[in-house]
């Protein structure tokens, strides 16, 4: 018999231990039909045999949707165009995948006339917020079930015992000590020995990128073409988003590009450590920065750098479907109108080295910047500019040296802020 009117649930399903166990748990505790949904975001071999596994776990059906192109064009590219980076390093590979998964989970729930959606996120992480806030935004009438906040399972051993009791198939790969999230943009690693921030990540953990010491001794050059801030070509060859990322992931991974080791502040208030591999994303992010450096004027670039952390915070916190994020997108779109051109990079043992950038909209002019002809910039004009620019400092100094000045106008003594 269904509990609280829940007759049918759509579960965000990965085929991992947790979501596999959730299938029978939902049936046992809610008496409901369970429909699984898996978003193909580029997990590759992780999708093998998923339908058989879902059905064997007790699901009535499994939906798999190839969302790689939508993921890149509608979620990754807007974030890259915004220059959004969370806490100086994280390119948000997991964060912007969740609202897309939630979007399709809600669509399937409406198609199947389901009463609720469910996810396998723990009560300590960010993903529970991202899934549930996105669901609220898209269909506030749907109930969300979060088993990790309800059940008695508290460990991997508990989950394995539950799986054995209800004959849920569990593969050997689920005994890995690391918790991972993979898509075409990145691969994250958490847990295990990473929980001690003093521990160096072990070499065997990495899957997408080579160690810099074992990367090729020869550098490789790559040219990335952009149109209005979106990457559209590689080495002069036009490419769709998926092909471009696949190519750059392979090339960047071979040359050890895109590893970061980050202790981040979770939305729920605790710190966590994650190691991320983001080859293509790191390359495109850097190339985009370089192209903006010649295409954006000073004030626009400075203001864009102000809103970028806010955009990153919104994405990280699961506020993709918010008015503010959409409003910031409007600002970003205007700034990207002229961010068209080509960037040439040299990849070498984990390093991205600038090799060139060009654009038909470049604001950099060699004749302006040089010390040659003065038909555009008259160096004698600099005198008046400097006098006006430095006027407040000059007035302050004059007040200090004039005998009639009071101590109120003297420069403050900062020595009290110095440490011994």
Image (cartoon, rainbow, N blue to C red):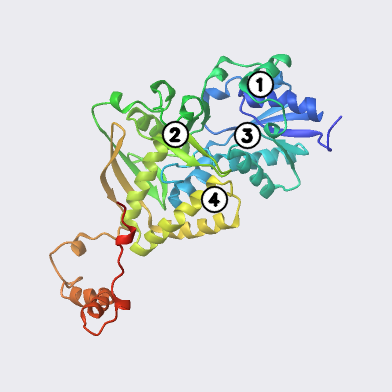
Q: Quadrant of residue 389?
A: bottom left
Which one is in front, 328 or 265? 265
Gap in angstroms between the C-alphas marked 3 and 1? 14 Å
Q: Is residue 332 visible?
A: yes
Q: Earlier in the sequence, mark 2 or mark 1?
A: 1
Gap in angstroms between the C-alphas marked 3 and 2? 19 Å
Q: Earlier in the sequence, mark 4 or mark 2?
A: 2
Gap in angstroms between the C-alphas marked 2 and 1? 26 Å
Q: Residue at x 32, y 39 (%)?
A: 235
Furthest toward the left, the residue is 372
Q: Residues within 10 Å of mark 1 (few under 14, many from 20)?
A: some
Q: Which residue is mark 3?
A: 121
Q: Earlier in the sequence, mark 3 or mark 1?
A: 3
Labelled disc at residue 314: 4
Q: Residues within 10 Å of mark 4 (few under 14, many from 20)?
A: many
Q: Which residue is mark 1?
A: 159
Figure check: 20 above or below 301:
above
Expressed as whole percent of the image width and height from the top left, the position of residue 8 reads 78, 33
On screen, residue 55 versus residue 177, left or right, reads right
Q: Quadrant of residue 360?
A: bottom left
Q: Earlier in the sequence, mark 4 or mark 3?
A: 3
Q: Which residue is mark 2?
A: 276
Gap in angstroms between the C-alphas marked 4 and 1? 33 Å
Q: Residues within 10 Å of mark 2 (few under 14, many from 20)?
A: many
Q: Is residue 43 visible?
A: no
The reply to whether callout 2 and callout 1 are in contact (CB within 8 Å) is no
């Amino acid at each position: 018999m269904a509990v609280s009117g829940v007759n049918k649930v759509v579960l965000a399903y990965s085929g991992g231990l947790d979501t596999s166990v959730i299938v029978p748990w939902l049936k046992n505790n809610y008496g409901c039909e369970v429909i699984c949904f898996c978003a193909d975001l580029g997990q590759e071999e992780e999708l093998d045999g998923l339908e058989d596994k879902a059905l064997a776990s007790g699901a009535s059906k499994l939906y798999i949707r190839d969302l790689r192109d939508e993921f890149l064009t509608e979620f990754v590219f807007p974030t890259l165009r915004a220059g959004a980076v969370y806490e100086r390093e994280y390119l948000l590979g997991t964060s912007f995948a969740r609202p897309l998964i939630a979007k399709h989970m809600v669509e399937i729930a409406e198609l199947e006339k389901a009463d609720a959606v469910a996810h396998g996120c723990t009560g300590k992480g960010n993903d529970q917020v991202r899934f549930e806030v996105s669901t609220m935004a898209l269909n506030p009438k749907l109930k969300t079930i979060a088993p990790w906040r309800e059940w008695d399972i508290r460990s991997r051993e508990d989950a394995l015992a539950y799986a054995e009791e209800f004959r849920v198939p569990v593969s050997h790969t689920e005994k890995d000590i690391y918790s991972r999230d993979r898509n075409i943009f990145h691969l994250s690693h958490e847990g295990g020995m990473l929980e001690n921030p003093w521990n160096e990540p072990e070499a065997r953990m990495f899957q997408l990128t080579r160690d810099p010491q074992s990367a090729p001794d020869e550098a490789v050059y790559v040219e990335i073409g952009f149109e209005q801030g979106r990457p559209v070509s590689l080495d002069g060859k036009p490419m769709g988003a998926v092909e471009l990322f696949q190519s750059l992931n392979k090339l960047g991974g071979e040359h050890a590009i895109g590893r970061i080791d980050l202790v981040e502040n979770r939305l729920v208030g605790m710190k966590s450590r994650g190691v991320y591999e983001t080859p293509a994303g790191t390359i495109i992010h850097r190339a985009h920065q370089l192209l903006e450096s010649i295409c954006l004027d000073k004030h626009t670039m400075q203001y864009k750098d102000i809103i970028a952390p806010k955009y990153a915070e919104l994405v990280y916190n699961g506020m993709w479907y918010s008015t503010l994020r959409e409003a910031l997108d409007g600002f970003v779109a205007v700034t990207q109108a002229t961010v068209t051109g080509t960037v040439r990079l040299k990849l070498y043992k984990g390093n991205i080295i600038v090799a060139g950038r060009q654009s038909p909209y470049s604001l950099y002019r060699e004749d302006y910047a040089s010390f040659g002809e003065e038909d555009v910039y008259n160096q004698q004009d600099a005198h008046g500019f400097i006098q006006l620019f430095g006027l407040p400092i000059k007035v302050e100094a004059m007040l200090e040296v004039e005998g009639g000045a009071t101590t109120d106008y003297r420069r403050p003594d900062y020595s009290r802020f110095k440490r011994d």
